[in-house]
Amino acid sequence: MLCAIIEGLEWVLKKFHAKEHPPQGGNCVGACERMLLTRMSIKWGIACVLLIALNFTGCQKLVEPAGLEDYGLPKVELTIAHDELATLNSHVYVRREVPGRVVIEGKRYNVLVRYSGQTSINRLKKSFTFAFEESRQYRGHRNYVLSAQTGDPTALNPAAGFWAFAQAGLHAPEVQPVACYLNRESLGLYFLIEPIDEDFFRKRGQSLGSLYEAANANAQFTFGNGYDVRLGFESRGEREDFFGDLERLLVLLDETPAESLPARIERLLDVENYLRYLAVSVLIHNWDGYFNNFRLHRDPRIGKFQFVPWDMDHILTMHPTRSNIRGANKLSERLLANAGYRARYRAILTELLDERLAVEELNAQLDATAQRLAPAHEADRFLSAGGISIFEHARRVQEFNRAWYIKIREDLENLK
Amino acid sequence: MKLHLLRICSISCRAFILLLGSSALLFGQEKTELSGWIRAGLSKVYEERASASFYAAKLQYEIKLGKSLEAQIDLRGASTRHEIELREAYFTADVGTGLNVDFGQHKKRFGLEYQKSKENLRTLERTLLYRYLESFGFAGRELNFRYYRTTRADKRPSGYSFSLGYNEAHDLNLIARWQRLRAAGSFTLGLNGIWQRDQKDNGAQMVSGFGLDLSRDTEAHHVELEALVGQDPFQSEFEADFGAGRKVYFAGGKALYSHRFVLQASAARAFEPVAVASFLAKDVGRFEVNTIEVLAGANYWFSPYARLSGNADFLLSNSPGNTSARTLAGSNFILQMEVRW
């Protein structure tokens, strides 16, 4: 093959030479010498390059590339040009967007991609956010999150966590586990998580009003110790950088006497929604959800703040101080100090414990998730590095849940 | 309707006056140079069914701020993104004969290919080794301070460059390069080193890379021979966090040859075939798992300012699961027209 290529080149050079120096008897010795040198050098140059290549390939068999494994899940194939990947990887913390292409469940989208997440941004397995082209949407959204959930070695938490909140009647993001690839290299098991934005509320018959993202594990509900809401909340609502109604809520919690609290707070907060959020958080140990992983939304038509859960990677594990029936923040403390709210909270907890979030239901959900994710969990080099199978994780969590539910039932008595 | 037309006319007039004003300012300033390129073409990736068209443009301002100070601003736009990007912005200060200092956002110059802009390469894209280096940040762009001495064929056969860089992944690096003209016959020898403090989840790791290159550039021939070796920060971090803690090293080499046939000297019309062979082992601990790149290409120069190029870039990769067979995954063909000014 090599000889054929060189012969071919020689033929091209001869033709070229004949055109430049037609045989008219003129003196073309110098030109011919130069041409000969040129011919020799190009021949040897190309021969060397090809020989090096062939030496390494060793004439190995050429096969069709195997299709990317889906492990029984939808696939997300992300393609980013190498120079754009360099830009992305050298601007991690400013979350710079770069153009890319993503194929989700066989459908191709041009997107702008950036790294996202609070904890996972420091990790090797990072989360991404896609912004779709203006006219394109995925599941009714102009943005979507591809979450690594690096805090959760079990991979069971996102599906179980959001399912639990939905059981209690709260708005919860849709979650879809996927097998993820970047430039054909496996990134492992990821989760497509519906972002909480204008499209989220529109799909649920609401409209975007004030929206606050709990951040930096410092979302407090008191101005005590000189707290500034900007330290723990990011305003993502209709009015950029507006914190007015959130600050009003905190002032109200700080200054309203216990006896007049219900009358005043119910004008600004959907208390039933929060008590349900608290009950689920207590049952599934959503200890990062008291100061960090939630969104606070105030639909202008409802006029009251509602909680939406976010980021379920730190659940179903015991926290030394926050795992208790009363939750852990100032808002829970103020509400549960009121006998009426305490009674309602007990009723909600009882309803969830006995019916919609009974331990058998929660554990069955974990079993189903483990069954579905087992091949992807095993193939994920980060998740499988610990040497514990997803079934073993599920078994341990289920045992833990049973013991925790017994404890909560006992503590219910002390909540009267 | 009349009012609407009037408004459109008024906006158009204002835009035209603004454009005239700004271009007068720009070109009226005789110390400002404007360069750049426009590219348009088609690309086809092996495993994809359809080919894709693309276009891109670069606009570079070089503003002389004094006898020994210059500012450069590189603006880019492409069909893949619908906004203009500020790609590079830096100052160059002349601090002595052949000695310069750069400061700002610009190239991270590790290796032979990153000494040049993409438009000055014989190939349309950077070759396999550099695409790999870009993925974990040994090459690319960042904020850096660079002190360097340029070479000159008649006076200064040796040149060097030291740069200290920092990026928004919180990585800190030092890059050094030394080169000597005619060090081996007519070949220029280059030595490269990078030492990087790579930020990771729980602290940082030190990684490094080294390269050796030989190049020869005459009117007709262009030859590049390169070898690179270094520590992969991503794989090493994975091994530290989830594996046995071993450091993962990569190694690779490249040979490039191109020849320029002048077809019409007066119009600088030329034809330039290019051949590249590269080798990359991402983990020298598993040297048998590797990728070989064989690139065949050609540039047809209509003038010094316009070229039509075609590159068929074959990537032959095997995998840890099957080292006896290779696939063409990632191989591509690009046809591109480029006009520069």
Image (cartoon, coloured by chain):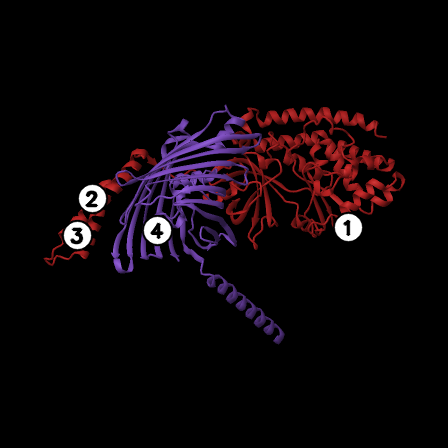
Do the residues at discs 1 and 3 belong to one chain?
A: yes
Would you name the residue on which mark 3 appears? A31
Disc 4: host chain: B
Disc 2: host chain: A
- How many residues crowd mark 2 within 10 Å: few (<14), some (14–19), many (20+)? few
Would you name the residue on which mark 4 appears? B310
Distance from the alpha carbon under mark 1 to that under mark 4:
61 Å
**SS at badge 1:** loop
Disc 1: host chain: A
Task: Identify the hue of chain A.
Answer: red
- How many residues crowd mark 1 within 10 Å: few (<14), some (14–19), many (20+)? some
Q: Quadrant of residue A126?
A: top right
Would you name the residue on which mark 2 appears? A40
Nearest the viewer among A184 and B246 is B246
Image x and y of residue A306, in percent: 75, 44
**SS at badge 2:** helix
Distance from the alpha carbon under mark 1 to that under mark 3:
89 Å
* Mark positioned earlier in the residue sequence (3 or 2): 3
Residue A24 relative to residue A374: left or right:
left
Disc 3: host chain: A
